[in-house]
Image (cartoon, rainbow, N blue to C red):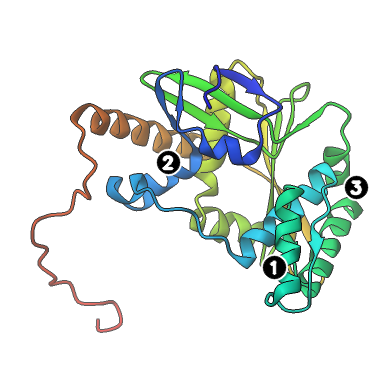
Amino acid sequence: MSYPFGIHKDISNEDYHAAKEIEGLSAVSSSFIKAWHKTTPLHATADIPPKQSVAFDFGTAVHGWALEGVVPIKGTERRAGKAWQDAVAEAKLLDTVALNHADYEKVEQCVASLYNNPHIKLLLEHKKRVCEASVFVKHEKLCLKARPDLYIQSQGIIADIKTTQSANPYEFEQRTMDRFGYTIQSAFYVKTLTLAKLPVKRFLFINVEKEPPFATSIVEVGEKLIEYGTNVVDNVLAEIQVAQTQQDYQTGWPPVHVANDLPGWIT
């Protein structure tokens, strides 16, 4: 199924991710940009189905419950057996995920902790918030697509919920953002919504820890990081279009690499 350029509030998460082409142009997401930047064109374009993991289900459950009140299915104590498979099947019908008892209780605590933070609660309960809308916009010979967790157009705020080991804002800034490509993600979202003529003034990461005490924080991405991320995004977009023209999506590695640098632990 194809969609016109613009903002769409009625597209499922599954259909959004399945949209590979919009109005005849290849659709590029922040995940694709990060993969191209961190690995190679060959790896970024490989048609590898995403692996469903416990961590993925956990994050999905927190997002759905906190943003849209979609409660996950509480399965069995262990993720095995017929009763567990029945819970998974029920969750699929309801467009949510199944969790074992321990993870269900942790997700419940995560959501409660998010709403117990008054600054986060204001965002989650904002009357004009739009949750998980899909944005498609033309950029040269490509289509950029983004799906912000939360967008408040009247204030120009994009917010993204992250479940994390540590919600310490200083650690998130110094380690987590670079490790998981969040700087690139935030810059890509700002660029995409701006091209779609939607106001953007702030990009916020709403963080909640996955283990007790389920601490929360808000990290706003500053101008310097947005500028850096935008430069990375623009360079990758240019590389993608060159590769598209030449139909060359190889690794870019040399035919033979001579390994001659001593590891740091030796020196």
Residue 66's spot in the image, x, y percent? Answer: 81, 49
Pick out the residue farthest to the bottom. Answer: 266
Q: Nearer the viewer, residue 198 or 231?
A: 198
Q: Are marks 1 and 2 in contact (CB under 8 Å)?
A: no
Front one among 221 and 83: 83
Q: Quadrant of the C terminus?
A: bottom left
Is 184 located above or below residue 116 in the figure? Answer: above
Question: Percent position (x, y) of residue 147?
Answer: 62, 35
Q: Residues within 10 Å of mark 1 (few under 14, many from 20)?
A: some
Image side of residue 154 versus residue 121, left or right: left
Question: Residue drawn 69% across and 77% down?
Answer: 81
Q: Secondary structure at mark 3?
A: helix
How many residues crowd around disc 3 within 10 Å: few (fewer than 14), some, or many (20 or more)?
Answer: few
Please give the residue where the numbered disc 2 appears in the rendered image.
33
Residue 118's label in the rendered image is 3
Residues at marks 1 and 2, CA–CA distance in whole angstroms = 35 Å
Which one is earlier in the sequence, the residue at label 1 or at label 2? 2
Of marks 1 and 2, the one in the foreground: 1
Q: Amino acid at mark 3?
A: Pro
**x, y percentage for residue 89?**
71, 58
Read off the residue under disc 1. Answer: 85
Point out the frontmost of discs 3 and 1.
1
Q: Amino acid at mark 1?
A: Gln
- Left or right of 34 in this view: 113: right
Amino acid type shown at disc 2: Ile
Query: Which of the 4 image quarters holds residue 194?
Result: top right
Tell me how far mark 3 sits from mark 1, CA to CA: 38 Å
